[in-house]
Amino acid sequence: MSLVEIQRAPRPEDAALLLHPEDNVAVARVPLAPGARLRFGDREIVVRDEVPAGHKVAVRGIAAGQSVVRYGETIGRANRAIEPGEHVHTHNLSFEDLATEYRFPERELPLPERREDAPAFLGYVREDGRVGTRNYIAVAAASNCAAHVAELVAQSFQQEPLPPGVDGVVAFPHGEGCGHAIGPDTELLRRTLAGVLDHPNVAAALLIGLGCEVNQISNYFPGDAWRTERLVGLTIQSSGGTRATVEAARSEIRRLLERAAAAKRRLVPASRLVLGLNCGGSDSFSGITANPALGVCSDRLAQLGGTPVLAETPEIFGAEHLLVRRARNREVAEKLLGYIESYRRYLAAFGATFDDNPSPGNKYGGLSNILEKSLGAVAKGGSTPLMDAVDYAERIVTPGLVFMNTPGYDPVSLAGLAAGGCTVIAFTTGRGSAIGFPTVPVIKIASNSRTFRVMRENMDVNAGRIADGEATLEEVGEEIFQLLLRVASGERTAAERFGHREFVPWRIGPVM
């Protein structure tokens, strides 16, 4: 991204941030009142309107129909003439689905090597070579009909002492699995559930079905026996009802706990980490502080041969050209664009567009449209080459930066990242978010100091210090990287301490 590096925020009297020399808008660091004076080099601007913190103020005159530029990129067009010092937002800035000329890579980059001399963390090395950061027993519902039983099973272990090193028995209840059309929708659910059950953070698992639902548990086992060394299947109908199924499940889990207890943490290089990158409740500061700081961490991990995973297809729309030119080869670039076009058709089937994505909270925080939001969101992926693009919940196997096709809806995106094998998720937020995941630690990074203070117990990192002039992108990026190593070694995140365990698979088809 052509984002001018912010080594230090402007002095207090310079209350707005100009992010790129070509920008014709700046971002208010603090609320601006009419008459306030802003200085950019030898230019002085008088503010004409009330401009909330995080919102844009014109630094030059912008003619009607002229591009409004932030990050050195077009984020829309002025729908009327805008004078220097005016507030620029949805009232005078129009979204436009811009025709983009892509610059495809003309070379083939090799995959990065997983460096064994990388900084280390204490992880669980599984039989297939993947490395976990947690050690759970998972209890998943095959369908909504078994969701309550799965929860009862997990709850029954909450007051029981577990063997040392076992992080817990956790449930994966959800509202899907029946009333599906057989085909892509059921295949997506099966891939998602299979991914969270066969996960590096899960030592062993139990899958519970009702018995007659569309998502039959037999789909998860190689033969007729609903049992492998690490996965057991039960149905409520064949077990004799709710109470009998809970008791049968508890008996199976007692045996599986022995397997989990046998796993021990050991030192492994950070190149074995798979880090999901997500944002939610974004504001205008997200693309200035939290996202590029996370991008610094992502770059470092990728350079070590680890795997940062960018997601949220609607939130790269309008910025995909930046990823295309960084792709490992043309094939990866075409896969990325294919996911965007497929998503466009998906939205059109419901009469929607990508610009329906910015929520009221996003707009209140200063983001005017999806183009502006996406240009800030892709910063989470840093600047290293894009090595692969994968579909929702698809197993991630490639070192280096990877993109996953997920919705922007946070719990659904996290479910896809986790099912793909992410062992830690870093989640940036401007408005504030409290989401977590049953078996994957979620690190919360606040984009502004106000949100960090107001939601202190829910936040792990304050990236707002960058806009406050108290830290650089590199410093906060290193802080995130060091926290990543500690969390991967067992340190609890705020979301874990509060017991946040949201799980929502992506349902794409009709309800039958």
Image (tube, grey):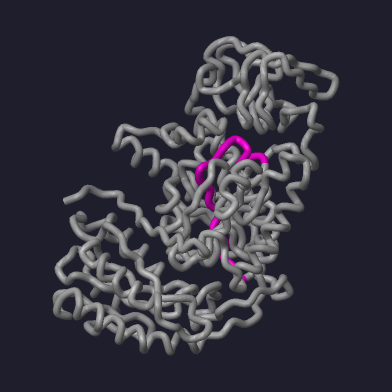
Residue that appears at 60% across and 57% down: 401
Q: Is residue 286 magenta?
A: yes
Residue 258 visible in the snapshot = yes
Residue that appears at 66% across and 43% down: 449
Going by the image, does 152 lie left or right of 32?
left
Task: Give the position of the N terminus as an image quadrant.
Answer: top right
Question: Vertically, is 431 above or below 512?
Answer: above
Residue that appears at 78% across and 27% down: 14
Question: Vertically, is 424 above or below 315?
Answer: below
Residue 289, image x, y percentages: 67, 43
Relative depth, front residue between 270 and 428: 428
Q: Is residue 245 magenta?
A: no
Relative depth, front residue between 104 and 208: 208
Q: Which residues are magenta?
A: 272-288
Relative depth, front residue between 390 and 372: 372
Relative depth, front residue between 236 and 12: 12
Residue 246, image x, y percentages: 25, 78
> For residue 322, what is the image quadrant?
top right
> For residue 354, what is the image quadrant?
top left
